[in-house]
Image: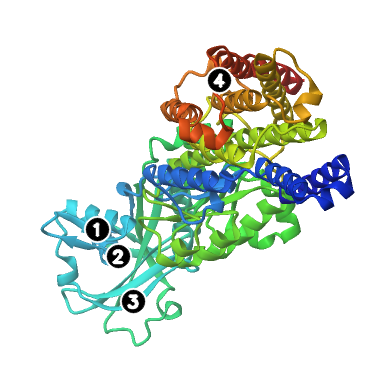
């Protein structure tokens, strides 16, 4: 815009000097000043002075609206990116599911009381007598609550912990050593069944401990898969007995030659709104990908419920990723919708692979180790409830409710904001182009149609209020039926540049027509020579000014949709009506109030027929735009 303004001003300044004669202009300071003022008028006409303020306010209002929908935007640039998101890589627990674990199934080898106590003791959650339930991480709370239902609530006091190997995502398990009532020490190891079973050499059969045969091991693996296929999160428990406190409580020293105790299957119900959100995302051309540390069978079962995948062939594990080169992963990334048993470092590879397909990627996370992948994604999404401060600080957006559906709502809001900003830009630029064309044509013919103060009034008063109201327009009905826009497309993509020019030309014709009608009303004839001499053109200027203002007020209603007919809009924009009324009142004041009218137009008054003619010409923008929209719909449909 700046380059265009400079070029136009220089060209018009030069043309005006040549038209008046170089010698005459250089020797006549008044003529030189008039020529300079024409160039200033053109600069004022070309620059949409309110654009920066309007766009900033629209973005701010949009971000506020997103916050009310639980999506907190930390970077304004994220709003634009949300509108073109193509792939969402989402954690399962707490985002797609409710993160409310409940144990619903057991596969017992050891006595039930020993199994329940071992699961509760090998947890960092604690039973709260006042609440009557466990407090802590949801998965471990489920295990402690499971023991609590059986009356096992005072376990930590009865069996103090004397050693531990804390949970590690690489080992996928944790171990504790506790003191028993008979003075011995019992180790409990809890973790992923496939890992824990592999560390066991014996198994309980009631109160007895017997060797774990390969046949029995296969039965345990099958039982784990059956529970996982029911969308249960499965954890295994194993134990080991000591006569004294182990001198070395490292994982390597503790986690071997274990006795298998049993499996615990817990359900984390999917969020009821997520399936609909995923369907909406699919309709909008947004692919949802699940990333989880759970067993692949559990992950696939939940992904099927949500409509993310249809069968297990679309799932892959972290171990499989380790065996793939970056080139192989890039080539086959679109084959997978579920990534199970992944480590945090895998997430960065997944993001990079999707981005290699020119996808705009959103990535969710809550842990410190998720920060690199969140930072690498186009849209990093942190969890407001379970997320760490590190994760939130690198995220572009934070979900106050940790809910996947909020991401889809944010994508819709991002599309709405971007659409509205484009409408605002088109509305303001079409008006400014009309001003440029009007001043340019009038200058070439040899008369003055607008003064800088009149153009500033239109740009800062008449245009700004309706532009702000356009920025608050509700989303159009098909906004989540469209495919994501190409992030490489500029703001003028989709024939918007053509729209601005055509609409600017239409407004120019209406404004110039109003000017000449005003001249005719005043003089009874139109004579260019008289107009060039500056005779009797004040009424024409006033009519042109009224028409330009009223065209903008009518045109803002056209811009509620770039393509849909104004008469098909089902929702009303009360802000647009209010802003149009305000702009109308202010325009009437500046043309009727004697002091303001003389400052703007000089000693001239407009008869009723002039006012009605100006209004009639301005109203023509609505039927003319309906015709143009119909033509463009037909062209773009082809």
Of marks 3 and 1, which one's residue comes earlier in the chain? 1
Q: Observer-nearest residue: 135 or 475?
A: 475
Residue nearest the viewer, comparing 521 with 294: 521
Label 4 vs label 3: CA separation?
Answer: 92 Å
For residue 433, which quarter of the picture? Answer: top right
Circles 4 and 2: CB atoms closer than 8 Å: no
Q: Disc 4, disc 3: CB below 8 Å? A: no
Residues under labels 3 and 1: Cα distance? 18 Å
Whether residue 125 can be seen here: yes
> Looking at the rendered structure, which numbered label has been put on residue 123?
2
Q: Is residue 495 visible to us here?
A: no
| Residue in the image at 70% along x and 29% along y | 504
Q: Secondary structure at mark 4?
A: loop
Q: Which label number is shown at residue 216? A: none
At a point 26% along the width and 63% down the height, the residue shown is 125
Residue sitting at the far front: 27
- Foreground mark, 4 or 1, reads 4
Q: Of tags 4 and 2, which is closer to the observer?
A: 4
Question: 10 Å neighbourhood of mark 1: few (<14), some, or many (≥20)?
Answer: many
Separation of disc 2 and disc 1 at Cα? 8 Å
- Number of disc labels: 4
Mark linked to residue 606? 4
**Pointers 2 and 1 in contact (CB under 8 A)?**
yes
Using the image, determine if residue 438 lies above or below residue 70: above
Give how far apart the Cα atoms at labels 4 and 2 are: 86 Å
Residue named by callout 1: 144
Residue labelled with disc 3: 164
The x and y percentages for residue 544 are 64, 25
Query: Which of the two labelled residues, at mark 3 and mark 2, occupies the earlier sequence position?
Result: 2
């Amino acid at each position: 815009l700046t380059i265009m303004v400079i070029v136009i001003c220089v060209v018009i300044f030069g043309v005006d000097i040549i038209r008046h004669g170089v010698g005459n202009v250089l020797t006549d300071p008044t003529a030189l000043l008039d020529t300079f003022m024409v160039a200033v008028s053109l600069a004022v006409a070309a620059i949409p002075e309110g654009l920066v303020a309007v766009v900033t306010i629209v973005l701010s209002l949009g971000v506020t609206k997103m916050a009310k929908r639980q999506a907190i935007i930390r970077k304004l640039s994220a709003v634009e990116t949300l509108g073109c998101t193509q792939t969402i890589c989402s954690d399962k627990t707490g985002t797609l599911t409710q993160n409310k674990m409940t144990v619903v199934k057991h596969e017992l080898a050891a006595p039930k009381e020993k199994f329940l106590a071992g699961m509760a003791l090998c947890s960092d959650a604690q039973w709260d007598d006042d609440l009557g339930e466990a407090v802590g991480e949801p998965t471990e709370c489920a295990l402690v609550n499971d023991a609590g239902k059986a009356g096992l609530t005072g376990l930590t006091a009865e069996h103090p912990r004397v050693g531990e190997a804390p949970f590690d995502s690489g080992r996928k398990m944790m171990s504790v050593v506790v003191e028993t009532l008979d003075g011995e020490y019992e180790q409990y190891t809890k973790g992923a069944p496939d890992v824990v079973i592999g560390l066991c050499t014996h198994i309980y059969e009631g109160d007895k401990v017997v060797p774990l045969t390969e046949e029995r091991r296969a039965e345990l693996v099958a039982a784990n898969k059956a529970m996982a296929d029911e969308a249960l999160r499965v954890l295994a428990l194993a134990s080991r007995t000591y006569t004294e406190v182990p001198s070395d409580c490292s994982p390597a020293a503790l986690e071997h030659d274990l006795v298998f105790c049993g499996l615990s299957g817990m359900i984390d119900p999917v969020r009821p709104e997520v399936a609909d959100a995923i369907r909406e995302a699919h309709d909008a051309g947004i692919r949802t990908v699940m990333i989880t540390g759970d067993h692949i069978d559990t992950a696939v079962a939940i992904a099927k419920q949500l409509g993310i995948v249809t069968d297990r062939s679309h799932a892959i594990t972290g171990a499989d990723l380790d065996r793939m080169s970056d080139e192989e992963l890039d080539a086959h990334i679109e084959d997978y919708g579920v990534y199970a048993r992944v480590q945090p470092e895998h997430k960065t590879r997944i993001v990079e692979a999707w981005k290699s397909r020119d996808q705009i990627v959103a990535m969710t996370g809550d842990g410190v180790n998720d920060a690199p992948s969140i930072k690498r994604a186009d849209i990093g999404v942190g969890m407001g409830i379970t997320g760490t401060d590190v994760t939130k600080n690198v995220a572009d957006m934070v979900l106050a409710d940790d809910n996947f559906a909020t991401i889809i709502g944010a994508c819709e809001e991002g599309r709405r904001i971007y659409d509205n900003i484009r409408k605002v830009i088109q509305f303001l630029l079409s008006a400014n182009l009309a001003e440029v064309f009007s001043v340019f044509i009038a200058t070439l013919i040899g008369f003055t149609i607008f003064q800088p103060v009149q153009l500033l009034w239109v740009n800062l008063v008449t245009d700004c209020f309706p532009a702000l109201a356009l920025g608050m327009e509700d989303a159009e009905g098909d906004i989540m039926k469209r495919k994501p826009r190409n992030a490489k497309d500029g703001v003028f993509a989709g024939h918007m540049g053509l729209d601005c020019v055509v609409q600017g030309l239409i407004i120019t014709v209406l404004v110039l027509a109003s000017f000449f009608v005003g001249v005719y009303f005043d003089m009874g004839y139109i004579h260019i020579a008289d107009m060039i001499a500056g005779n009797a053109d004040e009424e024409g200027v006033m009519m042109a000014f009224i028409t330009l203002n009223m065209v903008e007020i009518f045109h803002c209603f056209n811009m509620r949709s770039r393509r849909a007919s104004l008469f098909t809009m089902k929702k009303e924009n009360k802000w647009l009506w209010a802003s149009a009324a305000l702009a109308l009142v202010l325009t009437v004041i500046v043309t009727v109030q004697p002091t303001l009218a003389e400052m703007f137009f000089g000693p001239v008054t407009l008869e009723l027929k002039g006012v009605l003619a100006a209004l009639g010409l301005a109203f023509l923008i609505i039927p003319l735009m309906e015709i143009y929209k119909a033509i463009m719909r037909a062209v773009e449909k082809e």
